[in-house]
Amino acid sequence: MKVVELLEAEQALVDVGGVRKEVDVSLVDGVAEGDYVILHVGFAINRLDETEAQRTLAMLREMGVEPGAAA
């Protein structure tokens, strides 16, 4: 999911496929707006560069999973 806005208290607003969600980013150092993160149960657990994020999203779509549908 792409970080679209940093919020207070180590929270961020993220988006994938038009689905937006507030998540905790306290487990990942240096998260900034425009970064891509992997989420698990409402927590960002890893940061990806844009190329890797786009490759991952494409792979999920190929598997029939629409990113954001279960966000």
Image: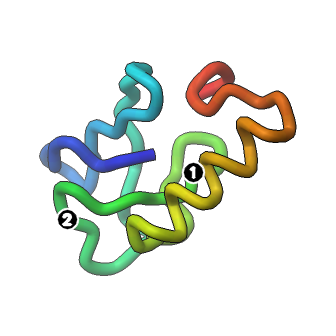
The answer to which of 36 and 25 lies nearer the viewer is 36
Query: Could you tell whether 39 is left or right of 8 in the image?
Result: right
Q: Residue furthest right?
A: 63
Horizontal and vertical percent for residue 65?
77, 30
**Would you identify the image quadrant in which residue 18 lies?**
top left
**Would you identify the image quadrant in which residue 62 lies?**
top right
At label 2, the amino acid type is Ala
Q: Residue furthest bottom?
A: 29
| Quadrant in which the C terminus appears | top right
Q: Identify the residue at image location x=64%, y=50%.
A: 40
Disc 2 from disc 1: Cα separation? 15 Å
Is residue 25 placed above or below 66 in the rendered structure?
below
Q: How many marks?
A: 2
Q: Which mark is residue 39?
A: 1
Query: Could you tell whether 12 is left or right of 6 in the image?
Result: right
Q: SS of the residue at dot 2?
A: loop
